Amino acid sequence: MFEFQNLEVYKKSIVFHLNCKSILEKKKVANYVKDQLGRASYSIVLNIAEGSAKTSKADRKNYFTTARGSVFESAAILDIMFQSKEIEESQYKENILLADELSRMLYRMIQNLSTK
């Protein structure tokens, strides 16, 4: 087992991606929305894993920052989908709360890697 597989943020990012994937599979949305949300939510998982393999703090911080950016991107897409009534309020709230939690976890990881 890889070290990153034990990280709670990694496990939660997989749940978030699978939630987004499920929404996209069940809803009729434009292909560009499917592509963008699919890629952004997948990017969170991959950047956490790849960042965990880096040996320098600066490299790890960069990957975790990119993962956090993808969380924000995913949240913005969910905002648009909710406002345009493409997803239900319960789906929106559940996933926005999870995105917020991921963002906070990644922020703490990034802060812990900052040089002081």
Image: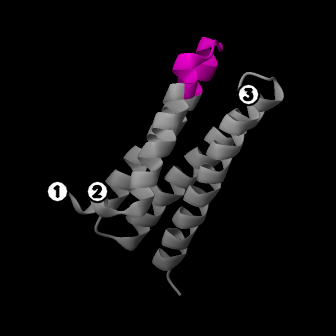
Left or right side of 1 for 29: right
For label 1, the residue is: 1
- Residue 92: x and y in percent read 70, 38
Specify the quadrant of the image occupied by residue 104. bottom right
- Tell me which numbered mark, 3 or 2, is placed earlier along the sequence: 2
For label 3, the residue is: 81
The stretch drawn in magenta includes residue 48: no
Looking at the image, do the residues carrying marks 1 and 2 touch, with CB atoms under 8 Å apart?
A: yes
- Residue 107: x and y in percent read 57, 67
By secondary structure, the bulk of the magenta-drawn segment is best described as helix
Distance from Cα at disc 3 to Cα at disc 1: 36 Å
What amino acid is at disc 3? Met
Q: Locate the N terminus and report the quarter of the image it occupies.
A: bottom left
Distance from Cα at disc 3 to Cα at disc 2: 30 Å
- Residue 77: x and y in percent read 69, 33
The stretch drawn in magenta includes residue 25: yes
Q: At 40% across and 55% down in the image, what residue appears?
A: 10
For label 2, the residue is: 5
Which stretch did the figure color magenta?
23-36
SS assignment at label 2: helix
What amino acid is at disc 1? Met
Q: Within 10 Å of the Cα at label 2, are there few (<14), some (14-19), or many (20+) other Cα atoms?
A: few
What amino acid is at disc 2? Gln
Q: At 52% across and 36% down in the image, what residue appears?
A: 19
- Tell me which numbered mark, 3 or 1, is placed earlier along the sequence: 1
